[in-house]
Amino acid sequence: MTFFTKSWRSLLALLLLFIFWEIIVKVLEVPQWLLPSPAKIFQEAALHWSEFSVHLISTLRLSLTGFAIGTVIGLLTAILLFLIPILKDTLYPLLILSQNIPTIVLAPLLVIWFGFGVLPKMIVITLVCFFPVTVAALDGFKQTPVELKDYLAMAGANKSQLFWKLEFPSSLPAIFSGLKISATYSVMGAVISEWLGAKEGIGVYMTLASSSFRTDRVFVAIFAIMILSLLFFAIIMVIERFVIRWKTKGDDSV
């Protein structure tokens, strides 16, 4: 049984949550500005979809671009650190330290250094996306079966052939795990980057809604972020199943 055939349970649980939420709001007569009902949130999304879709497309474009850049940088970094051990010993601790800086604190500095254009936004998204890919790829490279490496070495394979014909293919399951994490992070990174002074995007929409106490619109933005993150995750999972058929065939029964 695959992930997608199991997802109906999660959908059922989500539906029950919405029903419970709707009942609680009605019974307790919670003010809409404090906690809107799911019906009110979906109604707001439907009535003002044309307005919100502009922000949604802007965030989607930022997320995809930042994710692509972060993925490339993450893979290149992992390959360099793995093939050149002295670089790993020198730079890997610095990479870990870079993830300990809160993005919300770093964002204003990026505006000061690079202005209000696209560059600081791309930097924010790249920073949150590249690290999971780098760590996952490095772990995947190290998990290559030793007996296969010895076999190729005895067959006369050089270091480059050993990496591209064995170590890199063997690391694909780990790399895709990192990609799934980065894909979900890219949406939140895009929203945070839009707080830097963008003209459109879910982050801008959420800020304007919060400042005007339009809680229903805030929840519309939250639901959109969740749906985009799940959609990205599902797309990466589908690509993984096509690329790594030798692994996913065994996982279908799980």
Image (cartoon, rainbow, N blue to C red):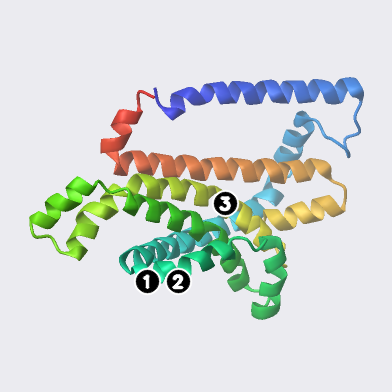
In this rendering, would 198 be left or right of 57? right
Tell me the kind of residue under disc 2.
Thr
From this view, report whether residue 65 is shown above or below residue 254. below
Q: How many angstroms separate mark 3 from mark 1 (CA)?
A: 30 Å
Under tag 2, what secondary structure? helix
Q: Are marks 1 and 2 in contact (CB under 8 Å)?
A: yes
Which residue, given by chain and number where applicable, does mark 2 sit on? 90
Q: Position of residue 122 (x, y in %)?
A: 57, 67
Mark 3 residue crowding within 10 angstroms, few (<14) / some (14–19) / many (20+): many
Q: Quadrant of the C terminus?
A: top left
Residue positioned 16% across, 52% down in the render = 150
Q: Nearer the viewer, mark 3 or mark 1?
A: 1
Residue lying farthest left? 155
Tell me the kind of residue under disc 1.
Ile
Residue positioned 78% across, 55% down in the render = 207
Under tag 1, what secondary structure? helix
From this view, report whether residue 143 is shown above or below residue 64. above
Mark identifier at residue 185 = 3
Q: Earlier along the polypeptide chain: callout 3 or callout 1?
A: 1
